[in-house]
Image: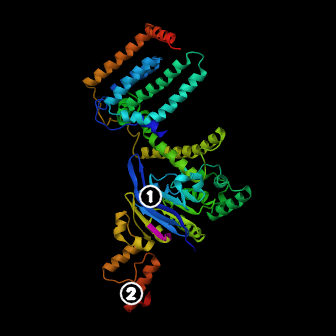
């Protein structure tokens, strides 16, 4: 699949009330891949993603969304291409029914009435919300409200989807459901940015990871390179994924591995190969 | 708009005004707001404003007033226009006075709130015999003003990200857009207030009827002096009105100025 540069952030500075939050951030978001934006609280992640659809405009530097400078476009124009979902669903839902919630976005984005129904139907099914269509959003559980908030943004089919802490407060079942939806959207060629502290979730779905600390991007690269770099992770106040951590402990003990594994299957493969070579792998 | 509230938010500073007893500062507030309401001509109100500016200068808080001035001015202009359009006579004169009255009232309250911590305030209220439930309610509502402003920003950001254009269309459409903002804000704040209430109970709020105040308030010489001066000011204002000196003064003014 052809990857296109969807959002280009060039040396952006931003400060709130004289407090510098972004200090020269450069980053590229591409379509057809999942980028995880990670880092400690207050590193500037949320401030950065608010630049992606023009809610905040850079005070220095530039943000280009599909070639268009965000300073020259309205939020409504940019929102058509970049869908941003905030952390707390309760800040975003207001309609009387789940269905209305989806229809609101579609009408704002100027969808013709003939297509509105069909789009709404599709998203409700995708997010497993079709059985609730007449319910008030406020009577849904937190996991369902979160899905609805994402569904409302996904409904108008933006090219880039930005999710702020999508896994916060979600149980394992909801997390894997979310991971499946994100993957499906990636396969359709969408660019996806997730802001998260959840290293294990990032291991599951991210293609690339950007680490932020102190208003700067300190490392960008493939998920494997970044999430196995303990020094970089420490600077962003993150712990390595548990599998990678276990592997590095084993390596310290003198084991050799062809690469640092990140997923259970990969660790299994390395261990099996190792034990095999010692002639002890018969039972694995 | 959030800037307007800046003049009512406490800032930690070391000034003679900050170290006064909250009850003494309350007396100042009473005298200043009584004066703002008692005088209705631009000259007295300007003089009063000068006094308030000097007080803010002593409290090293003039910059807060200046940064809020933009928001305040828009409200002053609104007051001016409304008065100008509705008054039968003496329009310019009274409209200016009414805008000045608003500014001097706002500044009077800012002198108090900029220099008094919510904690001091609630202690002062408790010492004066107000039940703790009410003082707590009062300090909590102050405490949550900045959070409310932040939530409003988040809600409006979230809706704008879904293509809502708040500033588009005629008055009716704009009003409807603002109701979209109001629903999530209201629901969110209600949910949060329930959560805060539960958290308070979990931490033992209400377990003891009478709670020893955390800070001890002491009325010192300078507090007595402030109290006495404020009472004098109140007395003078009352005398000016009772002896009709002030009404003679304003009618003279009204004759000179249209």
Q: Is residue A190 above or below residue B92?
A: below
Indicate the position of residue B59 as horizontal and vertical percent values.
Answer: 32, 31
Say which residue appears at 60% left-offset and 21% top-offset.
B86
Disc 1 versus disc 2: nearer the observer: 1
For the magenta stretch, what is the residue range? A205-209
Q: Give the mark, 1 or 2, whose residue is nearer the N terminus.
A: 1
- Left or right: where does residue B156 sit relative to residue B224? right
Label 1 and label 2: CA atoms lie apart by 40 Å
- Left or right: where does residue A198 sit relative to residue A2? left
- Left or right: where does residue A255 sit relative to residue B181? left
Indicate the position of residue B75 as horizontal and vertical percent values.
Answer: 51, 31
Q: Which residue is mark 2?
A: A274
Q: Is residue A20 above or below residue B11?
A: below
Circle 1/circle 2 CB separation < 8 Å: no
Mark 2: which secondary structure? helix
Say which residue appears at 44% left-offset and 58% top-offset.
A45
Q: Chain of mark 1?
A: A
Q: Residues within 10 Å of mark 2 (few under 14, many from 20)?
A: some
Q: Chain of mark 2?
A: A
Q: Is residue B242 above or below residue A82?
A: above
Does the magenta run of residues contain A208?
yes
């Amino acid at each position: 699949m052809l990857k296109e540069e969807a959002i280009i952030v060039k040396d952006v500075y931003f400060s709130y009330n004289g407090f510098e939050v972004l200090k020269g951030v450069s980053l590229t978001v591409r379509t057809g891949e999942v980028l995880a934006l990670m880092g400690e609280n207050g590193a500037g992640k949320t401030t950065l993603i608010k630049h992606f659809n023009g809610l905040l405009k850079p005070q220095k530097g530039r943000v280009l969304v599909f070639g268009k400078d965000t300073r020259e476009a309205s939020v409504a124009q940019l929102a058509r291409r970049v869908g941003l979902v905030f952390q707390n669903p309760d800040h975003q839902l207001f309609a009387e029914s789940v269905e209305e919630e989806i229809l609101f976005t579609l009408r704002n984005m100027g969808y013709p009435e003939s297509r509105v129904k069909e789009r709404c139907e599709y998203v409700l099914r995708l997010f497993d919300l079709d059985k609730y269509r007449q319910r008030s959003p406020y009577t849904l559980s937190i996991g369902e409200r979160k899905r609805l908030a994402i569904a409302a943004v996904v409904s108008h089919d933006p090219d880039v989807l930005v999710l702020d802490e999508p896994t916060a407060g979600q149980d394992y079942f909801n997390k894997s459901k979310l991971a499946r939806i994100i993957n499906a959207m990636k396969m359709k060629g969408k660019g996806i940015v997730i802001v998260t502290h959840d290293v294990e979730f990032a291991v599951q779905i991210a293609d690339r990871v950007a680490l932020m600390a102190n208003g700067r991007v300190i490392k960008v690269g493939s998920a494997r390179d970044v999430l196995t770099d303990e020094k970089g992770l420490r600077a962003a106040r993150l712990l390595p994924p548990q599998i990678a951590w276990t592997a590095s402990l084993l390596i310290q003990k003198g084991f050799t591995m062809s690469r640092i594994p990140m997923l259970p299957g990969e660790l299994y493969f390395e261990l099996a190969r190792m034990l095999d070579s010692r002639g002890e792998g018969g039972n694995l | 708009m959030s800037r307007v509230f800046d003049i009512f938010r406490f800032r930690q500073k070391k000034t003679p005004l900050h170290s006064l007893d909250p009850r003494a500062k309350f007396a100042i507030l009473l005298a200043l707001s009584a004066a703002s309401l008692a005088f209705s001509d631009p000259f007295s109100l300007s003089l009063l404003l000068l006094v308030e500016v000097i007080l803010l200068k002593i409290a090293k808080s003039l910059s807060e007033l200046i940064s809020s001035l933009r928001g305040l001015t828009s409200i002053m202009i609104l007051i001016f226009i409304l008065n100008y359009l509705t008054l039968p006579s003496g329009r310019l004169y009274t409209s200016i006075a009414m805008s000045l009255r608003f500014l001097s009232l706002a500044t009077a309250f800012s002198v108090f709130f900029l220099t008094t911590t919510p904690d001091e305030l609630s202690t002062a209220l408790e010492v004066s015999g107000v039940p703790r439930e009410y003082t707590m309610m009062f300090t909590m509502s102050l405490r949550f003003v900045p959070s409310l402003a932040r939530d409003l920003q988040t809600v409006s950001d979230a809706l704008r990200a879904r293509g809502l254009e708040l500033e588009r269309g005629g008055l009716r459409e704009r009003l409807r857009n603002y109701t979209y903002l109001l629903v999530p804000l209201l629901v969110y704040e209600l949910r949060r207030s329930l959560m805060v209430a539960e958290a308070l109970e979990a931490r033992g709020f209400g377990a003891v009827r009478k709670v020893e105040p955390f800070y001890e308030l002491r009325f010192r010489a300078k507090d007595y002096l402030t109290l006495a001066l404020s009472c004098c000011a109140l007395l003078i204002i009352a005398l000016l009105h009772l002896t009709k000196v002030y009404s003679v003064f304003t009618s003279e003014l009204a004759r000179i100025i249209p």
